[in-house]
Image: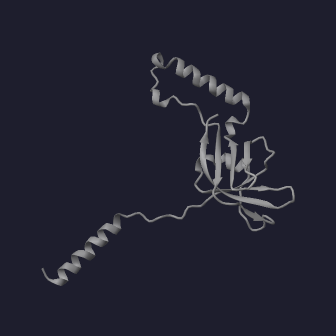
């Protein structure tokens, strides 16, 4: 086989393979500003050395205890009647009540102000909760008026 044919075949195969590859899209991470006293914040813990932190935000529908209790009762009834209801057992699941954000292995970035930072509020986050991407960032205010910005990863929390 001639060298020109070999080069042509290699170039053709390369173009063919590249035509099926997917371009990597740049992901937009969310930056959420948390008021740690908000009722939408389920709980938070920050280690004293600030190497680890965890923040949980309620899904909008389940902010009230009554709504969570109601959903739990519906779930219990579905489990109790699973044999006679005709429901697919793999579809019976307790709803996700909150989204947990976990940060570990590094200290947060300390900010003097929020000037120039595009962030969303807890309410805006709750409205777009199903579009969470990792990593996300959590910012909260300290008593001295400065802020901490945590790089976090999400996890669904049922309880």
**24 in relation to 121, above or below:** below
Tell me the quadrant of the picture where the C terminus can be found. top right
Question: How does the figure colour the protein chain or chains?
Answer: one colour
- Name the foreground residue: 108 vs 145: 108
What residue sits 64% from the left and 44% below the top?
A: 99
**141 in relation to 21, above or below:** above
Is residue 90 found left or right of 12 in the rendered image? right
What residue sits 47% from the left and 64% below the top?
A: 24
**Residue 29, image x, y percentages:** 61, 59
Q: Quadrant of residue 33?
A: bottom right
Residue farthest along the bottom direction in this orientation:
3
**54 in relation to 158, above or below:** below
**Residue 60, image x, y percentages:** 69, 40
**Residue 15, image x, y percentages:** 31, 72
Q: Quadrant of residue 38?
A: top right
**80 in relation to 127, above or below:** above
What residue sits 72% from the left and 60% below the top?
A: 149
């Amino acid at each position: 086989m001639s060298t020109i044919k070999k080069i042509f075949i290699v170039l053709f195969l390369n173009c063919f393979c590249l035509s099926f590859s997917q371009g990597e899209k740049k992901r937009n991470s969310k930056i959420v500003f948390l008021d740690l006293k908000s009722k939408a914040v389920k709980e938070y813990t920050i280690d004293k050395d600030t190497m680890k932190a965890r923040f949980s935000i309620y899904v909008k529908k389940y902010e009230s205890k009554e709504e969570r209790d109601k959903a739990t009762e519906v779930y219990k009834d579905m489990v109790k009647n699973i044999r006679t209801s005709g429901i697919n057992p793999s579809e019976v699941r307790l709803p996700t009540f909150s989204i947990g954000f976990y940060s570990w292995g590094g200290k947060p970035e300390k900010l003097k102000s929020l000037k120039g930072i595009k962030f969303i509020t807890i309410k805006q986050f709750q409205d777009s909760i199903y579009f969470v991407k990792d990593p996300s960032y959590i910012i909260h205010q300290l008593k001295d008026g400065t802020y901490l910005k945590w790089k976090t990863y999400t996890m669904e929390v049922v309880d």
